[in-house]
Image: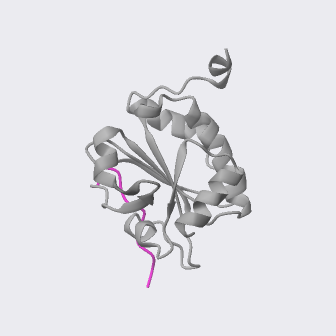
């Protein structure tokens, strides 16, 4: 059986819930506050996760916190994903465990090997997929691509130089 295709732009985002420090959160509640960026990565401590997530987190730190909710989703249990984020000092992306790959399957990024693709999916506040892309597993996802996507939703990403001043 072939894996499902990557979710298409314009599609209603499949609902899911995740565990947080305060209990659980739902995609619908998150979307009521801000657009949501789903950042799928294969698994904690894999070389691509180590190289990919820190630059994305640094870029997102330049945004006002209320402008976007970013979720890092992997096959790991939530506790392991949270520890991974803590070890990397990732602060702007929330760790979401998807050990059964239900979220990855719903968004069409589950791999036959038992983990997810390296993929980015941007959801608008109405819960529609604006952009979706699978990235090669051998290179970090391009931050400039994510910045262009955010600008399409009128979320301007300040340059790193302007953020330092």
Q: Quadrant of residue 16?
A: bottom left
Tell me the quadrant of the picture where the C terminus can be found. Answer: top right
Residue 64 in percent (x, y) is at: 48, 28
Vertical relation: 102 (above or below) 149 = below
Residue 66 shown left or right of residue 164 in the figure? left
How far across and down, in percent of the image, does residue 59 sit? Answer: 60, 35
Relative to 137, residue 69 above or below: above
Is residue 2 located in the magenta-colored stretch of the structure?
Answer: yes
Residue 132 visible in the snapshot: yes
* Residue under the point 47% across and 76% down: 100
Q: Provide the major secondary structure of the magenta segment.
A: loop
Q: Quadrant of residue 82?
A: bottom right
- Furthest toward the top, the residue is 165
Q: Is residue 55 above or below residue 120?
A: above
Q: Nearer the viewer, residue 118 or 57?
A: 57
Residue 83 on image: x %, y %:
64, 59
**Residue at the image position 45 percent from the left and 67 percent from the top:** 104
Q: What residue appears at the point 53 percent right and 40 percent down from the top-left corner?
A: 146
Looking at the rendered structure, the number of numbered marks drawn on it comes to 0
Across and down, in percent, residue 90 comes to: 63, 46
Report the side of 79 relative to 102 (left or right).
Answer: right
Outermost residue toward the bottom in this view: 1
Q: Write down the region rendered in magenta.
A: 1-11
- Magenta highlight on residue 153: no
Q: Residue furthest front?
A: 22
Above or below, comparing residue 156 to residue 149 in the picture: above
């Amino acid at each position: 059986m072939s894996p499902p295709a990557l979710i298409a732009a314009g599609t209603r985002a499949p609902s899911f819930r995740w565990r947080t420090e305060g209990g659980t959160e739902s995609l619908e509640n998150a979307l009521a506050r801000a657009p949501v960026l789903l950042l799928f990565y294969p698994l904690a401590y894999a070389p691509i996760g180590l190289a990919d997530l820190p630059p994305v987190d640094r870029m997102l730190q330049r945004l006002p916190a209320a402008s976007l909710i970013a979720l890092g989703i992997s096959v790991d249990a939530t506790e392991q994903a949270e520890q991974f984020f803590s070890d990397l000092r990732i602060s702007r992306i929330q760790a979401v465990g998807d050990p059964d790959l239900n979220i990855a399957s719903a968004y069409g990024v589950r791999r036959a090997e038992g983990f997810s693709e390296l993929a980015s999916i941007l959801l608008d506040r109405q819960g529609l997929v604006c952009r979706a892309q699978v990235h090669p597993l051998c290179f970090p996802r391009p931050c400039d691509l994510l910045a262009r996507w955010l600008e399409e939703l009128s979320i301007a990403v300040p340059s790193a130089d302007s953020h330092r001043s």
